[in-house]
Image (cartoon, rainbow, N blue to C red):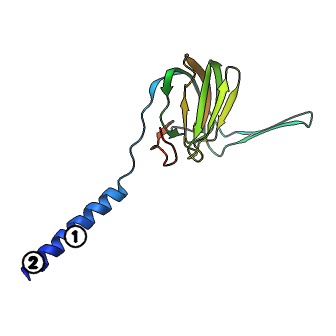
Amino acid sequence: MKHYREYMIGAAVIAASTVALMTTPARATSASGFTATQIAKGVYGTMDLNADKDGTWDLKLKTKADSDVYVTRNAIAAGGQSGWHTHPGPSLITVTVGEITVYEADLCTPRVYRAGEGSVDLGSGHVHLIRNESGATAETVVVQIIPKDATRRIDAPVPNNCNF
């Protein structure tokens, strides 16, 4: 009987340890060689924009509450990266110097953007990583629209399908 009780206690400890390990979230990734400098921030009330230019170009932007709009300059050293993360709203990323490689967590397929080109990050749980794989310095300017007073960046763990 004594051995049975010791066995059950040992089994319970192992089971609890296994559950704790399974529910511990994966570690977030840190940026390296990546410097962000806020250039401007504006607070906007509710927006309901619908621009139409000659019937060939449309823009629709609608918010239900106040928004923070940030403009940020990012300097990315050769070999630098942003770490895996998401944002609570969309970001318009314009490469101003060099080139960047953007990885989306769902596919982990690289997409290269060069100076003068732009990338749209949807935010809202859309996890991504920006790397400078070019061997030279890269810079971007980002316009970000998020809910007022929201945390701008939400770190995320390395996706299972990415090997770096």
Q: Amino acid at mark 2?
A: His
- Residue drawn at x 50%, y 31% is 82
Q: Position of residue 44 (x, y in %)?
A: 63, 33
Does residue 69 appear in this view?
Answer: no
The residue that disc 2 covers is 3
Q: Is residue 48 above or below residue 38?
A: below
Q: Between marks 2 and 1, how big is the CA–CA gap?
A: 14 Å
Q: Looking at the image, which residue sits at the far bottom?
A: 1
- Residue drawn at x 71%, y 21% is 116
Q: How many marks?
A: 2
- Residue drawn at x 90%, y 36% is 56
Tag 1 secondary structure? helix
Q: Residues within 10 Å of mark 2 (few under 14, many from 20)?
A: few
Does residue 105 appear in this view?
Answer: yes
Which mark is on residue 140? Answer: none
The residue that disc 1 covers is 12
Tag 2 secondary structure? helix
Q: Amino acid at mark 1?
A: Ala
- Residue drawn at x 45%, y 30% is 31
Mark 2 or mark 1: whose residue is earlier in sequence: 2
Q: Determine the image quadrant of residue 101.
A: top right
Q: Nearer the viewer, residue 84 or 66?
A: 84
State left or right for residue 80 relative to residue 116: left
Q: Position of residue 102 (x, y in %)?
A: 60, 33
Q: Residues within 10 Å of mark 1 (few under 14, many from 20)?
A: few
Q: Looking at the image, which residue sits at the far right?
A: 54
Q: Is residue 3 above or below residue 135?
A: below
Q: Determine the image quadrant of residue 131.
A: top right
Q: Position of residue 95 (x, y in %)?
A: 64, 23
